[in-house]
C-alpha cells in the first residue's frame, strides 16, 4: 500500500508531504510520476525554497523551507498533486492511504 502523509499549516495549506512504500504496480508508477512531476515543476517554475529527499524510489519527503512566504504557483502545483492523489485513492482505495495532519505552526 502507498502511504501519503499531507501536513497542513495553521492556514490549512499544504506545507509538506511524504509518500512511502512505492511498489511495482501501475498505480505505484502513476503516483510516483505525479509526485516527481510536482517536485520537478516546483523546482523549475517557482522560486520557493524547499527540501526534498527521495530514497531509492521507495519514499519521497518534501517540505517547504518557509511556508509562510510560499508563492501562489507552488500552491497550485501542490494542490493539483493532492487532487491527483485523491482521485487515484478514489479509484484504488486498497492501494493508497492518505493521512492529513494539521499543525498550528509547522517548521
Image (cartoon, rainbow, N blue to C red):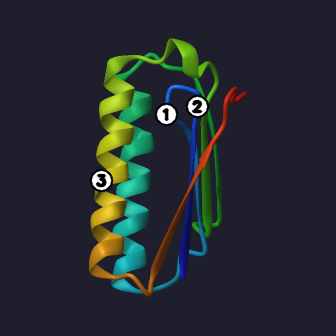
Give the image location of residue 10, x and y in percent: 58, 27
Asked which secondary structure carries label 1, the reply is: loop
Say left or right for 60 vs 32.
right
Q: CA distance from mark 1 to mark 2?
A: 5 Å
Give the image location of residue 5, x and y in percent: 58, 57
Q: Which residue is denoted by mark 3 in the rendering?
A: 83
Question: In front of the other: label 3 or label 1?
Answer: 1
Q: Residues within 10 Å of mark 1 (few under 14, many from 20)?
A: few
Q: Residue at x 44, y 87 (%)?
A: 94
Q: Residue at x 72, y 27 (%)?
A: 107
The image's mark for residue 9 is 2
Question: 96 above or below 43?
Answer: below
Quadrant of the rendered image containing residue 26: bottom left
Quadrant of the rendered image containing residue 42: top left
Question: 28 above or below 46?
Answer: below
Asked which secondary structure carries label 3, the reply is: helix
The image's mark for residue 86 is none
Q: CA distance from mark 2 to mark 3?
A: 18 Å
**Mark positioned earlier in the residue sequence (2 or 3):** 2
9 or 32, which lies in front?
9
The reply to whether callout 1 and callout 2 are in contact (CB within 8 Å) is yes
**Mark positioned earlier in the residue sequence (3 or 1):** 1
Question: 19 above or below 75?
Answer: below
- Quarter containing the N terminus: bottom right
Q: Residue at x 70, y 26 (%)?
A: 105
The image's mark for residue 12 is 1
Amino acid at each position: 500500500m502507498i502511504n501519503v502523509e499531507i501536513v497542513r499549516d495553521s492556514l490549512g495549506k499544504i506545507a509538506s508531504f511524504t509518500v512511502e512504500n512505492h511498489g511495482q504496480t501501475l498505480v505505484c508508477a502513476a503516483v510516483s510520476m505525479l509526485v516527481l512531476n510536482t517536485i520537478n515543476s516546483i523546482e523549475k517554475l517557482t522560486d520557493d525554497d524547499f527540501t526534498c529527499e527521495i530514497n531509492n524510489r521507495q519514499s519521497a519527503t518534501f517540505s517547504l523551507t518557509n511556508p509562510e512566504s510560499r508563492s501562489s504557483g507552488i500552491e497550485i502545483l501542490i494542490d493539483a498533486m493532492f487532487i491527483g492523489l485523491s482521485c487515484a485513492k478514489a479509484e484504488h482505495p486498497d492501494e493508497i492511504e492518505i493521512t492529513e495532519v494539521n499543525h498550528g505552526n509547522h517548521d
